[in-house]
Image (spheres, grey):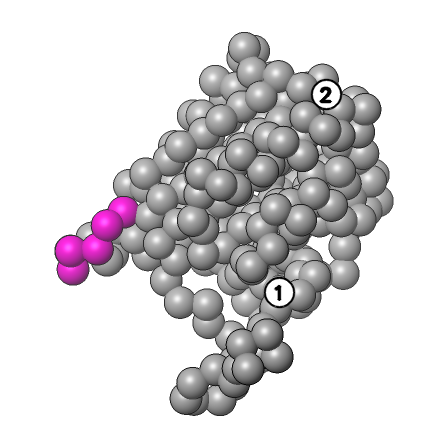
Amino acid sequence: MITLGAGAPREVAVLGAHCDDIGIGAGGTLLTLAAGTENAAGHGRAPLRVRALVLCGAGTVRAEEERAALEALCPGADVGLTVLDLPDGHTPAHWGAVKSAVARFAAATRPDIVFAPQRDDAHQDHRLLAAIVPTEFRDHLVLGYEVLKWEADTPRPAAYQPLTPEQAKDKARILFESYPSQHGRDWFDESAFLALSRLRGVQCRAVHAEAFTIDKAIVDLAAGPRPASPSEE
């Protein structure tokens, strides 16, 4: 399995249509990044900055759940969360509001990596956000996460973040403990989250993993200065 490192990020941006999307899609990766930050703290490095935008749920218990979940998934990190009040299931009818919100969010952040839904997600709110994010984060590595749910829309991923068994279990536990409002959903349980992370682990020769899609990335395999682009010549 070929491993390409992106370096230790100083800031990551995470975007979700609904409260719990980010944790389901990238919670284990956030735990991994936060663990790296804790290890670097002894060397004088600033804590990881995590900036999060969620389109739906403001003013409800779900926003409180989201804040608690992110704090648990990003221990020691500097977490900033914005939850909007767009209508769940109807964000395509509010395209302009979503576009403006993502634009404001992008202007206020300087992420090294961006996490957002993947383009082929069956939920219309997820697809809209997945389409808009790259138009505002044009010069960033955007990783599309998968949201486990009833629809059979799991993607064919291109990138994997291996997780330790402890990280996979911690993610599943934090999700279940942080979102009691979702316990009535038949797919929302620890065994389902662990099953998906085990499957992704098999695909990258790890015990557990999270998987992501990528629209475009630059792979710099050569040492030395970057060649000038036509606009720079």
- Quadrant location of residue 19? top right
Identified by mark 1, the residue type is: Ala
- Residue name at image x 43 percent, y 49 percent: 110
Residue 153, x across and y down, in percent? 81, 46
Identified by mark 2, the residue type is: Asp
For the record, the magenta segment spans: 42-47
- Residue name at image x 58 percent, y 50 percent: 137
Q: Is residue 46 above or below residue 141?
A: above
Do the residues under discs 1 and 2 have CB atoms within 8 angstroms? no
Q: Is residue 231 above or below residue 76?
A: below
| Quadrant that contains the N terminus | bottom right
Residue 159: image tag:
1
Residue 226, x across and y down, in percent? 48, 82
Nearer to us in this view, 187 or 21? 21
Q: Nearer the viewer, mark 1 or mark 2?
A: 2
Neighbour tally class for label 2: few under 14, some 14-19, many 20 plus, Cα within 10 Å: few
The residue wearing badge 2 is: 88
SS for dot 2: loop
- Quadrant location of residue 45? bottom left
Nearer to us in this view, 186 or 159? 159
